[in-house]
């Protein structure tokens, strides 16, 4: 009996040996492989707020900057190749001011390819992104966060399309003329407004991607049903990990977006990733408000540092990858990507992915969890580019069937 037991244990050890060896593959080896994958693969991030950040604190993003999460030096270090550059319009702006801001930020985005044609290039189609990648040029892709500048004139969408806007986030933190916002108690439209319904159809016809990050649940389910093309969440995570937080997507809406062949791009904000971080962030924010301090002031930073000694405010890339994996489990590998929200979330970033140099850390964690290079490349850009291609193809077929031209 004892001899049999010994033999069984020996057999188990022999069978287990290769997998134990694999598991012992050092972090260093995984890190090197991740770095190689990031260098050779096309990496696209679908939401970085650098234009607003740079307008506010001017610095040249073609070189290493002091502030902010994004510049070309750190992007190259992280293997990043293409960024949806967000034209962010505050919900406080009237239509006219919103349109002025659209033009200011578009000018800023274009400034880089015009000034540094050997480093940056504008991309207004997926083919541009791939071509720029082959030429080692960094792709800047304009997009609009908040459709409020459209006002009551759907014709403005054509202007935006002609300016190269790839996607429009229907609303921001306030309900607007298009849809209800998930940050706003005012749910006056119960989803999309009548004008918003018309704009969805017009965006389909023009080949502009519909982005439902910031929209209420009702808006998301109506938009996904109404749109003929796939839709995206450019920077949203999973509600599964932060129950009750409507800014993240519940499983049924993740599935609905995937069934329409769209994509959910995971937001890196630690508040979105972890419910403990969410609650503690709310507590420190109230504390800052009560003392009338901003988080980036000296006193504010000191208060946050003190609070952080006893309260978890940030998590790391493991929780971020948990969200990626959850979307894969709920919907499949073809429906997830990266939409960091860098330059838009202040200090609330994963401890090991603090800026655009951090994509290899995410890839390392995906490798550790057994994802293949093919799957990783889908997450890094393949899924988003597929959706964008489909949106443009759908616009072509809609225009052919109606005989309408842009
Ligand atoms: Zn946002």
Image (tube, helix red, strand yellow):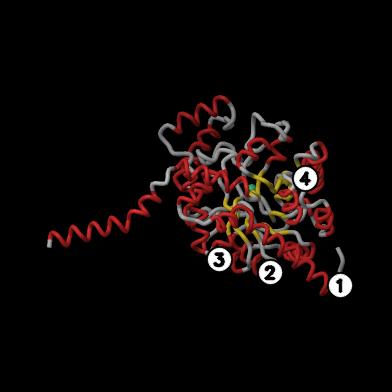
Which of these two is toward me, 87 or 370? 370
Nearer-the-camera pick, 340 or 116: 116
Which mark is first along the chain, 4 or 2?
4
Q: Is residue 89 left or right of residue 40?
A: right
How crowded pointer 3 is (Cα within 10 Å; few <14, some 14-19, many 20+) is rated as many
Residue 173 visible here: no
What residue would you read off at disc 1? 403
| Residue on which the image places disc 4 | 121
Which is more N-terminal, label 1 or label 2? Answer: 2
Q: Position of residue 5 (x, y in %)?
A: 17, 60
* Mark-to-mark CA distance, 3 and 2: 16 Å
First-in-chain label (3 vs 2):
2
Q: Nearer the viewer, mark 4 or mark 1?
A: 4
User: Dot 4: few (<14), some (14–19), or many (≥20) neighbours within 10 Å?
Assistant: many
For the residues labelled 3 and 4, the Cα–Cα distance comes to 35 Å
Name the image quarter holding residue 53.
Answer: top right
Q: Say which residue label 2 marks.
A: 226
Q: Earlier in the sequence, mark 3 or mark 4?
A: 4
Q: Mark 1 or mark 4, which is nearer the start of the sequence?
A: 4
Decide: marks 3, 4 in contact (CB < 8 A)? no
Respond yes or no on whether mark 1 lies under 8 Å from ligand 1.
no
Graded by Cα atoms within 10 Å as few (under 14), some (14 to 19) or many (20 or more), the crowding at tag 1 reads: few
Give the number of callouts: 4
Q: Mark 4 and mark 1: span between their CA atoms?
A: 32 Å
Could you give the CA–CA distance between mark 2 and mark 4, rounded to whole angstroms? 34 Å
Badge 2 element: helix
Instruction: Check disc 4 and report its element: helix, strand or loop.
Output: strand
The numbered dot on residue 255 is 3
> Alpha-carbon distance for marks 2 and 1?
21 Å
User: In the orientation shown, which residue stands out farthest toward the left?
Assistant: 1
């Amino acid at each position: 009996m004892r001899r049999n037991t010994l033999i069984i244990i020996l057999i188990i050890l022999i069978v287990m040996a290769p997998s134990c060896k694999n598991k012992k593959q050092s972090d260093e080896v995984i890190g090197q492989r991740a770095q190689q994958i990031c260098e050779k693969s096309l990496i696209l991030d679908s939401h970085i707020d650098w234009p607003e950040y740079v307008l506010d604190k001017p610095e040249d993003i073609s070189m290493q900057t002091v502030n902010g999460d994004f510049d070309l030096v750190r992007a190259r270090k992280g293997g990043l190749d293409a960024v949806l550059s967000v034209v962010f319009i505050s919900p406080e702006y009237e239509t006219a001011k919103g349109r002025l801001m659209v033009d200011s930020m578009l000018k800023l985005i274009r400034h880089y390819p015009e000034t540094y044609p050997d480093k940056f290039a504008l991309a207004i189609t997926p083919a541009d992104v791939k071509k720029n990648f082959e030429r080692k040029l960094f792709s800047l892709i304009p997009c609009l966060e908040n459709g409020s500048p459209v006002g009551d004139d759907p014709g403005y969408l054509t202007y935006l399309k002609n300016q190269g806007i790839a996607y429009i986030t229907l609303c921001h933190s306030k309900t607007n003329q298009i849809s209800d916002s998930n940050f706003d108690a005012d749910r006056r439209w119960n989803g999309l407004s009548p004008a918003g319904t018309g704009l969805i159809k017009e965006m389909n016809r023009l080949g502009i991607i519909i982005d439902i990050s910031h929209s209420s649940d009702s808006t998301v389910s109506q938009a996904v049903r109404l749109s003929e093309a796939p839709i995206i969440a450019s920077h949203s995570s999973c509600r599964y990990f932060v129950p009750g937080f409507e800014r993240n997507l519940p499983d049924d809406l993740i599935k609905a977006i995937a069934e329409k062949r769209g994509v959910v791009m995971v937001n890196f904000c630690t508040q979105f990733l972890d419910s403990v971080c969410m609650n503690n962030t709310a507590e420190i924010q109230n504390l800052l408000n009560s003392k009338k301090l901003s988080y980036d002031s000296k006193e504010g930073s000191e208060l946050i540092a003190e609070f952080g000694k006893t309260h978890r405010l940030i998590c790391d890339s493991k929780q971020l990858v948990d969200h990626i994996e959850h979307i894969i489990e709920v919907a499949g590998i073809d429906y997830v990507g990266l939409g960091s929200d860098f330059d838009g979330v202040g200090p609330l970033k994963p401890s090991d992915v603090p800026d655009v140099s951090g994509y290899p850390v995410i890839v390392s964690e995906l490798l550790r969890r057994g994802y293949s290079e093919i799957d990783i490349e889908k997450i890094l850009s393949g899924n988003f580019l597929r959706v964008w291609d489909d949106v443009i193809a759908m616009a072509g077929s809609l225009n052919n069937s109606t005989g309408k031209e842009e």
